[in-house]
């Protein structure tokens, strides 16, 4: 949820940390803070608000340079967003400084015990409790900081990524991870610490991603020292060469990251199937599937677990797998799956979907499925993420960095990967004729060009948005493959414009939502030529007779719906199973333009964070 950045080396830490925090602000933006160490004293600045607010405050109050520093941008859990609850936090002595991402579940019991020992607390955070627990262990056990961190973390319950230093030992930072991501960038006689690699990509492309229950002692002039938190066993760093491109994490001339990422979808979809889809040869090549083909072909069922937009991609996949490969599929909210004592067997395949690869509930579902003996396959976007490491096999989406909190290209690239898997399995099982199989491959290969064409409706979408920007409610309807797209369209509008919106199967409209329809209610209907077209037309007629305002997504050249709807947005013709890759585009643009016109912060909508790494 929160973003953490640290630096120790030969550079001035301040610009590294501030720029790093700006890149991590998608992870949380309730408050922010920075601490610098000048070799003698620490200098702290923190504030409620965004990183830009911190930058103004710190530049006015901190007049020193430091070669060691920590920074944090917060998504509030314990305590309201204010200056006091912002990170970093000091221990009572002022010697230890910490930043923390995650939740310490047993912090109240620890806090009570520390108060009895004379400790006092300024904030409402679990983080201040943790740093004082580390200090208490350090004093009581007479150990160095690294050992104190290890002992303290064995006493806490919850999730964390932490970075802590002792001002009496200015050449060292101790970091640790459980359930929240943490990367260490390795430079020339310098180290970087961050929640992901974006804060240090222009300085180094070598990084170590900590595994769960690992800690590292980072010292200038020495190699990283890794230990297992539970048993103090030595761990060995796996240094990865990052492929991240600096240009990919900048706006590139667009007003917002979200708009940039909407327009990146043709390339992102192509990058996702590049090397995997050889349409002219009739080949789908995916190592994670090829090496585990029997697991999928012999599966009694596929269970898909995900949250938010990824869950909607999973719903689309349910239609694709069952329709093409004839494999039973269940799609579960990861947050519910783990708590309802699900029936899982060794003959099940669980597919976990997550943009970040760090979603806490999805990770917990993975661990549960593995305990029950199921084969677990991951679909995520971030190389080296926790889900990539925890699953038996998987496939990356190759969407590139997605900075906007509201997912766009994550959704379409996830559907692309899942479609490739379904088509491969359908072909292996003989469920598709050779001609139909080749037709699907050619259709999928042509999707990026069709997305490009769909994006040409941007100005028309903006005009429609101007009409409906002041609406208070909106209904989204779709059937079959496009029912999940209706859910996703409604989610996008809710997330970034704060307009209440609901997605429904079009046939369910008569079972309740129709009571809401009047001349003030915009209704977005996905009415493509393939897939229950006549039924959806009937739904549109029912809306029209009740004075509802209709925005219809139709296949190019449609005439029937055009006569009924108030507004029509066309997409190129494609197969029904691939239509979600196109129908979602106008809905993304609609939510974007409405949000901009309402003055909302499109990339950083209130109360949300990009990566949900705590429950």
Image (cartoon, rainbow, N blue to C red):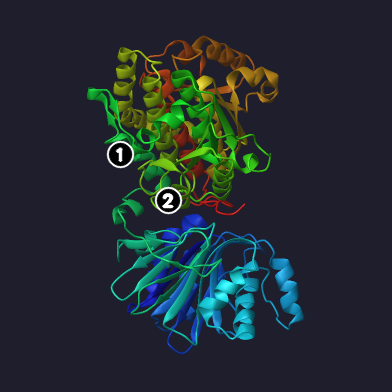
State the residue in front, 572 or 548: 572
Q: Position of residue 152 (x, y in %)?
A: 61, 72
Identified at 42% across, 79% down, the residue is 68
Instruction: Check the image and report above or below for 30 versus 54.
Output: above
277 sits left or right of 169 in the view: left
Q: SS for tag 1? A: helix
Q: Is residue 257 visible?
A: yes
Mark seen at residue 271:
1
Identified at 29% across, 29% down, the residue is 449
Instruction: Check the image and report above or below for 303 versus 380.
Output: above
Q: Position of residue 290 (x, y in %)?
A: 35, 33
Mark seen at residue 279:
none
Q: SS for tag 2? A: loop
Instruction: Check the image and report above or below for 550 versus 529.
Output: below
State the residue in front, 94 or 545: 94
According to the picture, the residue beneath numbered tag 2 turns out to be: 403
> Which circle's residue, 2 or 1, is located before the other in the chain?
1
State the quadrant of the N terminus: bottom right
Instruction: Check the image and report above or below for 353 versus 231.
Output: above
Q: Position of residue 303 (x, y in %)?
A: 55, 33
Q: Is residue 459 visible?
A: no
């Amino acid at each position: 949820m929160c973003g953490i950045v640290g630096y120790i080396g030969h550079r001035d830490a301040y610009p590294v940390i501030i720029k790093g925090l700006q890149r991590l602000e998608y992870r949380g933006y309730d408050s922010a803070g920075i601490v610098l160490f000048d070799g003698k004293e620490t200098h702290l600045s923190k504030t409620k608000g965004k990183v830009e607010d911190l930058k103004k405050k710190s530049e006015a109050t901190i007049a020193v340079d430091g070669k060691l520093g920590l920074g944090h941008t917060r998504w509030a859990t314990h305590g309201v967003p204010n200056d006091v609850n912002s990170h970093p936090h000091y221990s009572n002595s002022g010697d230890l400084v910490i930043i923390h991402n995650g939740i310490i579940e047993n912090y109240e019991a620890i806090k009570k015990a520390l108060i009895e020992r004379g400790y006092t607390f300024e904030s409402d955070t679990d983080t201040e409790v943790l740093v004082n627990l580390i200090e208490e262990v350090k004093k009581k056990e007479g150990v160095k900081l690294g050992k104190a961190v290890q002992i303290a973390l064995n006493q806490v319950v919850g999730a964390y990524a932490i970075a802590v230093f002792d001002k009496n030992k200015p050449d060292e930072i101790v970091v640790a991870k459980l359930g929240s991501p943490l990367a260490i960038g390795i430079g020339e006689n310098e180290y970087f610490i961050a929640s992901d690699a974006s804060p240090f990509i222009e300085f180094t492309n070598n990084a170590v991603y900590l595994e769960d229950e690992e800690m590292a002692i980072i010292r200038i002039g020495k190699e990283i020292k890794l230990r297992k938190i539970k048993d103090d066993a030595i761990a060995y760093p796996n240094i990865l060469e990052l492929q991240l491109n600096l240009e990919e994490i900048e706006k590139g001339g667009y007003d917002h990251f979200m708009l940039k990422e909407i327009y990146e979808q043709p390339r992102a979809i192509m990058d996702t199937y590049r090397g995997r889809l050889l349409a002219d040869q009739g080949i789908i090549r995916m190592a994670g599937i090829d090496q585990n083909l029997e697991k999928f072909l012999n599966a009694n069922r596929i269970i898909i677990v995900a949250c938010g937009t990824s869950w909607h991609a999973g719903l689309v996949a349910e239609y694709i797998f069952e329709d093409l490969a004839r494999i039973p599929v269940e799609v579960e909210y990861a947050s519910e799956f783990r708590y309802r004592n699900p029936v899982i067997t060794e003959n099940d395949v669980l597919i976990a979907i997550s943009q970040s690869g760090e979603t806490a509930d999805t990770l917990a579902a993975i661990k549960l499925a593995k305990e029950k003996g199921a084969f677990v396959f991951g679909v995520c976007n971030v190389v080296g993420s926790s889900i990539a490491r925890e699953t038996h096999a998987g496939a990356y989406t190759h969407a590139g960095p997605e900075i906007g909190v509201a997912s766009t290209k994550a959704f379409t690239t996830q559907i692309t990967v899942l479609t490739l898997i379904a088509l491969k399995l359908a072909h292996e099982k003989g469920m598709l004729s050779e001609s139909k199989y080749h037709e699907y491959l050619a259709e999928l290969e042509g999707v990026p060009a069709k997305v490009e064409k769909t994006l040409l409706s941007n100005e028309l979408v903006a005009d429609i948005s101007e009409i409906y920007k002041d609406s208070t409610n909106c209904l989204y309807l779709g059937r079959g493959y496009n029912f999940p797209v209706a859910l996703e369209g409604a989610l996008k509008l809710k997330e970034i414009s704060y307009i209440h919106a609901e997605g429904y199967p079009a046939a369910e409209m008569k079972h309740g939502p129709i009571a809401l329809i009047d001349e003030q209610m915009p209704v977005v209907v996905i009415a493509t030529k393939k897939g229950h077209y006549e039924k959806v037309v009937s739904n549109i007629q029912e809306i029209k007779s009740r004075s509802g305002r209709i925005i219809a997504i139709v296949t190019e050249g449609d005439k029937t719906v055009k006569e009924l709807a108030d507004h029509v947005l066309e997409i190129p013709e494609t197969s029904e199973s691939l239509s979600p890759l196109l129908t979602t585009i106008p809905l993304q643009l609609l939510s974007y333009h409405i949000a901009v016109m309402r003055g909302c912060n499109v990339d950083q909508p209130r109360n949300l964070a990009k990566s949900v790494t705590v429950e």
